[in-house]
Amino acid sequence: MIRQNFFPKVSLPSKKDGKWGFINTYGETVINFEYDFDLYNNSYYCSWYACFQNGLSLVRKDEKFGIINKSGDIVIPIEYDEIKNDYNFKCLIENNVIPVNVGGLWGLTDINGTLITECLFSEIQDFHEGYAFIKEDVPGIGERYGIINTSGEITARYLNITPEYYYSAFHGQKGWVKFPHYTYFNNGLSAVQADGKWGYINTSGEFVIEPWLDTALTDTTPFTNGGYDFNKFGYAKVFYNGGWNIIHRYGYLTLNEWWDKIIENDDYFICQGENRDKIISSSCESVFYGENGELYNEDSELILKYEPNSIVHIGGNIFSYRHEGITGVLIVNKTN
C-alpha cells in the first residue's frame, strides 16, 4: 500500500477498551492503551488532558499521576496524587521543575523524576522567572507564606502578605489566585497585599515598594487582587485614592497628576481624565498632551483638535481620534 503523507506523523490521544493510549496519524499505536486520562470522569476532557508539551505528557493510572515521553517511557513515576497542570491539562514545567503532590502536600521534582524537595507544602503557586509562592501550615501558628525557587531553596519565609482567593467554577472550590493573571514575579518583583494595601516585593520577600497602593490591577475592578507587570523600562500603572498613576520599579510616581483611566500596551500609556488626555511612551517620555479638545506636543505646539478621550491606539505609532464626528489618524513620530 502506498501511504499518502497528507498529514504530519504526530501522536494523538485515543481510547480503546476503556483505556487511553496514543496513535499516530496513520492509525499506528505508538503508546499502549493502559492509561486513565479522564481526571474528572468525563471523556470530553481527555483530548485536552493527554497533550504533549516539551515532549512530555501527563498520564493517570490506578488513581495516580505521572509523566511519560513520546516514546511511552515513564519519566516521572506514576505515584503522585496530583501533578501541577494548566487549564489545558498540560503539566507546568519551568527550568525542568514540576510541582507534585502526595497526600495533599506539594513538593518539587525534576523532569528526570528526581525529587528536589519533599512534599511538605500545602500549596506551591505556579513558577515564573524561577520563583513561586508557597503556603505552609505552621503548627500552633497557622498558614504562613513564603517564596521558593526551582532549586528548592526557600528564599523567603513567613511573609507579611495576604494572598487573595479565587473561586474556581471548574473545581467548585476556593483556592489561591492563579498565575499568570495576578500574583507572580515579573522583572524580579511581585505585587502583594499586606494590611489591606498593595505593594511590591522582590524574590527575597523584601518590600521594594511599600504597601500603600489601593491596587495594582484593573480599571474596572480597582479593589481586587493582583498586580500589573512592570514593562521593559520598569514602569507599571497603579491605583490609589480614586485615581491612576504610573510608578517606577524604584517606587517613585512618574505623573504629577492622577487620571481616571490609563490604557497600556507594549509601546504607550494612554491617560484619560475629564476633558484631558495624555499619550506617553512606554519609557515614560511625554509625547502629546490634550486638554479641552486641543492636542499639544511636548513643545506646547497645537497639533490638532479632537474630542476628549477619543484617542485609540491602532498599532505601532498610529492612533485614531474623533473630531466633529469624523475619525482621523494621528501618527506619533517620537517612539522608543
Image: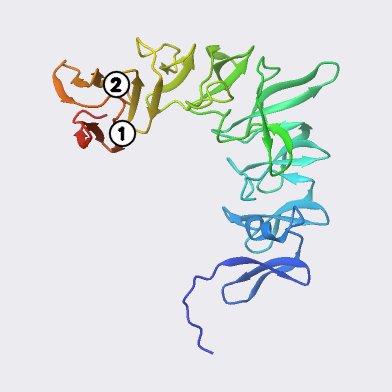
Residue 245 x/y as whole percent: 41, 16
Q: x, y percentage for residue 1?
A: 54, 90
Relative to 185, is 47 on the left or the right?
A: right
Q: Which of 48 and 54 is in front in this view?
A: 48
Residue in the image at 20% along x and 36% along y: 328
Q: How crowded is mark 1: few (under 14 residues within 10 Å), some or many (20 or more)?
A: some
Check disc 2 and give the amino acid type.
Lys
Q: What element carries label 2?
A: strand
Q: In which quarter of the image is the C terminus?
A: top left
Residue indicated by mark 1? 312
Q: Is residue 3 above or below residue 329?
A: below
Q: Earlier in the sequence, mark 1 or mark 2?
A: 2
Q: Residue furthest front?
A: 325
Q: Where is residue 41 in the image (x, y as percent from the top left)?
A: 77, 56
Question: Which residue is painted at 29% across and 18% down in the image?
Answer: 276
Q: Which of 224 and 273 is in front in this view?
A: 273
Residue beneath the point at 77% across and 31% down: 122
- Is residue 288 found left or right of 301 in the rendered image? right
The local secondary structure at tag 1 comes to: strand
| Residue 93 drawn above or below residue 57 | above
Q: Say if 148 sits above or below 258 in the image.
A: below
Residue 122 image label = none
With respect to residue 329, does 22 lie above or below?
A: below
Q: Image quadrant of residue 104?
A: top right
* Residue that badge 2 annotates: 278
Q: What is the three-letter code of the residue carrying label 1?
A: Val
